[in-house]
Amino acid sequence: MEKIDPFSQQLFSGTWEAPNNDLIKDNGGVYKVDKDKEAYATELVEAMMPDSSEMEPSPIESTSPLHNSTNNTPKSGKNILKSFSELAYVRNQFPKKDDAQKTEKTPQDLGAMATKKERMWIPHAINSQIDRMNEDLKDSKERLEKMIKGKGPKKGIEYYKQKISFYESEIIKAEDARNKAKAENQNKKQTIEIKKDDAKIQKEIGEQLNLIDSGENQIRYVDNAPKMDAFKRATLKDLSESDKTEGIDIAGLSNLEEEEVDILLKDALVNKEEESQETSAPMIVEAFDKGWYGKAEELEMHKFGQAFETFDQNTDKKIEQHGNWVLEKARSAGEWYKKQPLKYKILLSAGLLISASAPAVLAGAAVSTIATAAFAGSIGQRALGGLATFVAAEAWLKKSAEKGGVERTKAEATRHTIEAAILGTLVGSGYVAKGLKNIADATGLTTLITDAYHYWLPTEDVAKIMEANGTPLPTEQIAPTATPEAPGVKLDISDTLDVPEPETPHLDIDTGLNTTATPLETSTLSAVEGATKEVLERGLTTDFSVELGKNGIPTSLERVFHMMAVNNMGLKDIVIFGEADGAKSLNIAANLVKLAEGHNLADVDNLSGISASDFNNAVTWDQAKNILTIKDHGAFNKIVENLGGRADTLWDQGVLQKGSVAYLNDIKPETWTEILHADPLEKVGDIETGIIGHDDITPNQITDFDNSEMVKTADEAQRKIAERLEALRNELNANPEPIKGTTYTVTGADKTTPAGDWVSTKEAPSANGAEVIENATPIKIPAKDALESLSNYNVNKIMNHDIDGLFGKKGFFGFGAKSGLESPEWLKAKGLPVNKASGALKNYIENLKVHTGAVPQANETTEGYIKRAIAHFIKDDEWLKTPLTTVAPTPEVFTPSETLTAPTSPTSAPEVFGEPKVTPIPTPPLETIPKPPIASVETVTHQSTGPTVYGTPEAHLPPKNSGTVWFGENNNK
Amino acid sequence: MMQQEEIKNTLIEELGLSSLSDENKDIVISKFGENLLKRVTAIALSKLPEEARAEFESLSQEGDNDKMHNFLKAKIPEVEELIQTEIKEGIAEFKNIVTGLK
């Protein structure tokens, strides 16, 4: 066990008290703390800490409250107070005494400790450094020079020679002074004054080191030094209160490099800083005040965070006082609200707030909101329809009010907005009729509002109204694609529709309309038929054959089908190509692929299933030759029509919103334009195919799916699906027997299938007796035409989720949250070799190794390994075909004689790799598989299907129960 | 769209959020709305007679908004005024809290 000199041990454990013989008198007769030791302590800390002038600014340095300097800084950025503060933080990371008392540790013990308590490394590192420096300073100038030499020009040898000489002379002087003082003051009660020049720093040191009252001595500060700020004081207090660790075992861990120490030290500071953010709001406020956390807006948001802390508490108190039943309902409403996308929250908030200032009758909107929340899941989806109504209604109001070229006044515009918002809220809640009456009564704009309502409500609702009132529904007022349930559809009727001033239909608004879908009136049906006719008119007009990848034809079958699907969709007069349109088109295309692959599609509601043989009667797909042949374009059109109906149904059921929508932003905006225009398919040779596309839709009319709340929500749903899959896989691993009573097997669920699109439709048992849902009616959306493959997408999703969990900041009540992917820890670590991972990331990687059986490869990047391990875990063969991401070779060369880790997962096939550099196995060009960035020269290609052995497998097989060993590490250390 | 922005601007002014970015404004408004919804739900349902709770539960399951609205209005005639008052108080309370932090 290495020793730490008593002074250092006491100093850094906060237990040091200045005895008489540690106080000296300077030339002015004022006693001070032994200066040589103070300087010594300063020097120790300085030498350990990186010189800020020599380093690039790091997040720690730029944000840490500990880096506040004082006027007494003896050297830029390196005053003793800063050093003490930093050490105070670091010292807080010391392990508990139980851990520290272990004196004998095997490398395995240490590895386990590092995993369980990675911070254990930090005190070791520091004390190890201290000890080494102590030895150097006391015993050997040469050793000190040698050690410091590598730190850069500003810490050159000459500088330290001077310092050492200075210390030597000072020590001699100090010893003389000490002896003299001892003689003069022995057994004498005294008051010690600290020289004014040093008062500030001495005061702080004195407070920290309990020097205020040391035995019989009294220290009086002759300087009115400003009181140490609360943050620093609390920090220093941490040192004396929380760090009492003694006897720390540092044996066996002395082989850390200085660079690693620096990294660990930074980690510790960051961790501590984050902890303090979460647990000590006043400190953080002060930190914000001092600009440690930068932007004023963050401070402002912090203020609101604090305000909400109080407001939330007040709300809880208010609702609790009404008893458990009310409490439960109110919380349920809150939970329902939380699940809504942000823009609906804004709308609902707006509805509530407006209710407070509008005529009393408009508070009905708030009542409806409560009713909606009470219904929660049962009609939650319908509530989302309110936004579309809102948008449409306000556009209608604008259009109507400005007829004749007269712009609305600001007051009018505001009033219309309020009306539209409330209408939207009411429609969302389903309370349409009452809302109309209330708004009409309050505003006198009966005609306008009812017109808007009449025009934009779902067809079945309008039909029902007409049915109730015996008024024929003008077919031209049906907008087949304007589905209020599609909040992303931004419809601006003022720009596109010249709606005649309608004759006000007489609505019996007291009837109590039922929004349940009912058989449509004849007039309505005719409208729908009209829409269908348009679809059929837009279909293929002839039979033809195309070779994919030639003459501008996309190489992806799904892309080709996607173009055909969109072409057949009735998008005439559409203003915005929104989430609903995109998701439906993706769904149709994916189903066409499934059919081409020989799968059957089951019935959905009143739509009959489609068999693969039916499809083959219309279409032939020769995968080997990449040739798609439309043999019966009429039959093909009917299939697409059927699939369109399915997509509509799945959208209405809210299924696509959780599945296909998540993939909309995987397609670039310009690619969406290409798909919509479908130019390459318009003519095949001299044959006009009838695929004329939608050339009238411009890029500006395509929704920005990257910023779509609905897409973001669907992404979140996909993440949950991944979690469910993980749980299911665990269950299957634990119980390999088929789970009785299930209606489907996982095997039928393609890994690239957006599970949210699955429908638990009954399916005839398959040939092997298992009931398989392979109809995938809503089916997978393998994004072959996307930026990245779906498989890669899922791998990324899982990794992003995990990294966010490791390094993300939750902030206060959701404010100030930061993505872990943008954290400095991750940005720094992701491109480094995986065996360089430290701290929490290393722990995570260890877990990955255990749970996935994926073995880190020589020079594999951290990010590359994590993705590969996840791909192993979710058995994503496609992703595993991609080349490894590697970093530049390091001197640590992987050799066959090194031991590899045995996969521990019972389901993981052993994967053995030999030489770090092998000839890449050529993989066919896969449009769907993006190639991850390769960080450097060395590329190792591997496959995951079955055991893959390169080189001499026997040499690499690990012994049973062997521990985990990193590549390049010396196992004998 | 202009109108939608306008309605938000009213809220922004009311809650003193003008110095925040659009993203943060939305966050505050949405968070505020969550509190309001819980408060108005609690104040409204607190006035619902206990004997009517079973019917409320039943209507909740049924999912008929029209019936629910009529039910609430019938059982709590002053529900709209209650809600208005609660919302106004909530706004004032929040503004006071924020002001107190400055």
Image (cartoon, rainbow, N blue to C red):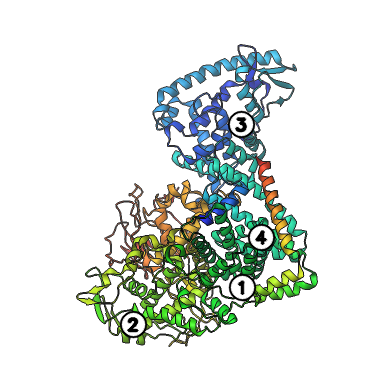
Q: Type of residue at label 4?
A: Leu
Quarter holding residue A693: bottom left
Badge 4 density bin: few <14, some 14–19, many ≥20, Cα 10 Å: many
Left or right: A562 with respect to B62? left
Local secondary structure at mark 2: helix
Callout 1: chain: A
Numbered circle sitting on residue A636: 2
Q: Position of residue A852 (x, y in %)?
A: 46, 64
Give the mark nearer the N terminus: 1 vs 3: 3
Numbered circle sitting on residue A11: 3
Q: Type of residue at label 3?
A: Leu
Q: Nearer the viewer, residue A407 or A434?
A: A407
Badge 1 density bin: few <14, some 14–19, many ≥20, Cα 10 Å: some
Q: Nearer the viewer, residue A931 or A160?
A: A931
Q: Which residue is mark 1?
A: A378
Q: Which residue is mark 4?
A: B37
- How far apart marks 3 and 2 lie (CA) works out to 84 Å
- How far apart marks 4 and 2 lie (CA) works out to 51 Å
Q: Nearer the viewer, residue A251 or A432?
A: A432
Q: In the rendered view, tell whether residue A251 sits above or below residue A547.
A: above
Callout 4: chain: B
